[in-house]
Image: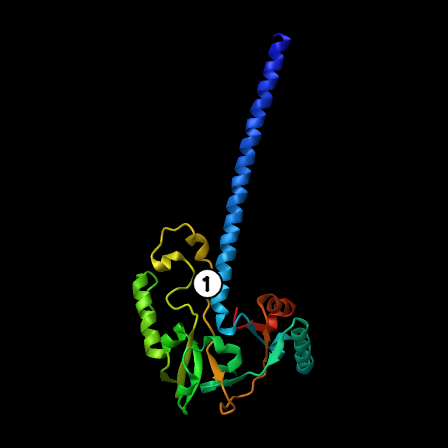
């Protein structure tokens, strides 16, 4: 081979490697684009879900902290533990609030009207004297009204009709359960008819996003009694409740002592 042949062969190799490098760059770029798009999609779903869940409290997070003997390996000082919880609440920008319980077996937490005003859908002037105004999820109301939840694979139209029926029968009405009358002032987000965010819930069973969305659960809301004045008789509780301005600050106190904390709005 002559010198020119070697030069042509070398240039061909360089051109070939450039082509391979370009192909690798395109493939890597496409993979990163897919990953970024997936990340943005997940973040968008999270933001949309949180916006719905936190709408009743205007974005605020209610957190319940518990100081109990069962959380200690040996005997612990409950008062000292409660003082530590209150310091943690203040450290992360939270504010302690007064919460009690009402209803049979003191099963429902009662909070002030100001904290959940956004969730009230009917005037509280309509509340009868013998009823407690509450906010409850669709799932809870279905149980109170003895309405069965649609099957998992039921058509979306049937699920919507069932939810509409629950709203028509519950919102602004008095429901008696457990020997107590409740006036339904608002309906909270819940998991009625859908255990996750999968699009199969609305009939789109072949969507590839279902592999991701079906792993995101739709948690149920806590039933809340509305403390509109001083006439509501509440039982005192040992838990310490606090309200935080946003999720980041609430997560801060969760990381400090997760074994003592249960979040009711998340």
Say if residue 148 shows up in the picture.
Answer: no
Determine whether, in the image, residue 156 is placed left or right of residue 239: left
Q: Which residue is located at x 58 percent, y 83 percent?
A: 98
Please say if 201 is above or below 54: above
Front position in the image: 185 or 74: 185
- Which quadrant of the figure has residue 61? bottom right
Determine whether, in the image, residue 163 is placed left or right of residue 242: left
Q: Which residue is located at x 53 percent, y 78 percent?
A: 115
Q: Quadrant of the N terminus?
A: top right
- Which quadrant of the figure has residue 14? top right
> Are there few (<14), some (14-19), or many (20+) residues within 10 Å of tag 1?
few
Front position in the image: 68 or 252: 252
Q: Which residue is located at x 60 percent, y 65 percent?
A: 248
Q: Position of residue 180 (x, y in %)?
A: 40, 87
Q: Secondary structure at mark 1?
A: loop
Which residue is labeled 1 in the image?
A: 217
Q: Position of residue 111 (x, y in %)?
A: 52, 82
- Which quadrant of the figure has residue 161? bottom left
Give the total of numbered labels.
Answer: 1
Residue farthest top in this picture: 2
Q: Which residue is located at x 43 percent, y 52 percent?
A: 209
Front position in the image: 148 or 87: 87
Q: Identify the colour scheme used.
A: rainbow
Say if residue 261 shows up in the picture.
Answer: yes
Q: Position of residue 62 (x, y in %)?
A: 55, 74
Q: Position of residue 172 (x, y in %)?
A: 37, 81
């Amino acid at each position: 081979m002559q010198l020119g042949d070697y030069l042509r062969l070398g240039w061909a190799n360089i051109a070939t490697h450039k082509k391979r490098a370009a192909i690798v760059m395109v493939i890597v770029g496409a993979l990163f684009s897919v990953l970024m798009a997936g990340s943005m999609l997940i973040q968008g779903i999270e933001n949309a879900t949180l916006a719905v869940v936190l709408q009743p409290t205007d974005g605020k997070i209610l957190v319940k902290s518990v100081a109990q003997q069962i959380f200690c390996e040996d005997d612990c000082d409950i008062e000292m533990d409660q003082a530590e919880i209150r310091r943690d609440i203040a450290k992360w920008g939270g504010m302690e609030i007064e919460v009690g319980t009402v209803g049979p077996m003191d099963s429902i937490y009662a909070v002030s009207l100001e904290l959940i005003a956004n969730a009230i859908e009917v005037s509280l002037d309509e509340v009868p004297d013998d009823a407690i105004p509450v906010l409850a999820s669709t799932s809870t109301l279905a149980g109170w009204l003895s309405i069965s939840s649609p099957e998992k694979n039921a058509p979306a139209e049937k699920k919507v009709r069932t939810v509409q029926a629950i709203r028509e029968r519950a919102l602004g009405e008095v429901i008696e359960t457990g020997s107590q009358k409740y006036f339904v002032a608002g309906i909270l987000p819940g998991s009625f008819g859908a255990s996750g965010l999968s699009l199969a819930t609305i009939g789109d069973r072949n969507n590839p996003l279902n592999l991701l969305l079906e792993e995101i659960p739709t948690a149920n809301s806590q039933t809340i009694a509305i403390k509109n004045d001083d006439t509501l008789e509440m039982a005192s509780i040992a838990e310490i409740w606090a309200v935080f301005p946003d999720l980041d600050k609430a997560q801060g106190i969760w990381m400090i002592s997760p074994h003592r904390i249960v979040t009711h709005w998340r």
